[in-house]
Each structure stands twice: as structure tokens, then as C-alpha cells.
Amino acid sequence: MSPVVPRFEVEDESLDAVRVISVRGEIHLSTAPEFSQRLTSAIEAGHTRIVLDFTAVEFIDSTGLSVLLNGLRRLSQLDGRLAIVCANPTVLRLFAVTRLDSTFDIFADRESAIAHVAG
């Protein structure tokens, strides 16, 4: 029996001064390292205005939340901005239950998140 491979894809693009990292699938123990690497690489490349598009994220666990908190901390040290696009009720509930909905700037649509970090 072969192991179950989690559905996970990540891609990024630059829109003027904003770096958008789009994630699809699940962010957890086995996929968080790749997500962390992409976010860290963007920050190390000098991108301080970042939107994480979680429109297609189905699940995130504490490992994924830790990646988000570390990214936010690094960006804050650089006077950067981070916004998350998410409308999935399951994922939004996790942010609410952990009270991280007041830590992160979360938007229902990509355009609002981009405007927020660009401003």
C-alpha cells in the first residue's frame, strides 16, 4: 500500500510591489516545510509586502500556523505587511478558535488584501 500524498501546491507571483503566494490543498506537518521555504525565500529576496492567497486551502494545522506567525514576525521586523485571503469557513474557524484572527489581517478577496499591503 502506498502512502497517501497530501494535495499541496504553492506558486508565487509579483504584482508591482506586492508578492502573492497562492497555496492550494492542505498545510500541515508534511507540507509546511515547503510553504515555509517559499515564504522565507520571498522575505529574504526583499519582498516585504506579501499576500498569502489561501482561497484554495482546505486545511491548516498548528504547524502551518507556526509558519504564518514566523513569517509575520520577520516581516514586522522589516516594517513589512502580510495579509491573508481566505473565505473557507473551516480555515477561518481555526483562526478564530486560536484567536489569531486578531493577529492576522484576513480578507475575503484578493483585491482587498493586495490593496491593504500595498497601502
Image (spheres, helix red, strand yellow):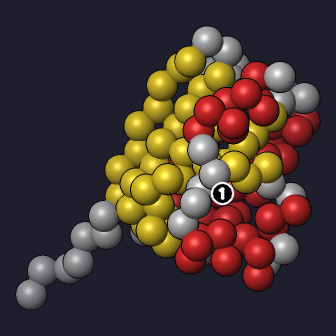
Number of on-image labels: 1
The residue at 72%/43% (across/down) is 83
Taking depth in this image into account, of 42 and 51 the one nearest to the observer is 51
Residue 77 picture quarter: top right
Which residue matches tag 1?
A: 67
Q: With respect to residue 79, does 105 lie above or below? A: below
> Is residue 44 shown to the viewer in this render?
no
Taking depth in this image into account, of 82 and 88 the one nearest to the observer is 88
Q: How crowded is mark 1: few (under 14 residues within 10 Å), some or many (20 or more)?
A: many
Left or right of 104: which side holds 91? left
The residue at 47%/32% (across/down) is 12
What residue type is disc 1 on? Val
Taking depth in this image into account, of 88 and 21 the one nearest to the observer is 88
SS category of the residue bearing label 1 = helix
Image quarter where the N terminus lies is bottom left
Residue 35 in percent (x, y) is at: 51, 50
The residue at 90%/29% (across/down) is 79
Left or right of 105: which side holds 20? left
> Is residue 111 shown to the viewer in this render?
yes
Residue 66 in percent (x, y) is at: 70, 64
Q: With respect to residue 5, does 33 lie above or below? A: above
Image quarter where the C terminus lies is top right
Residue 30 in percent (x, y) is at: 43, 68
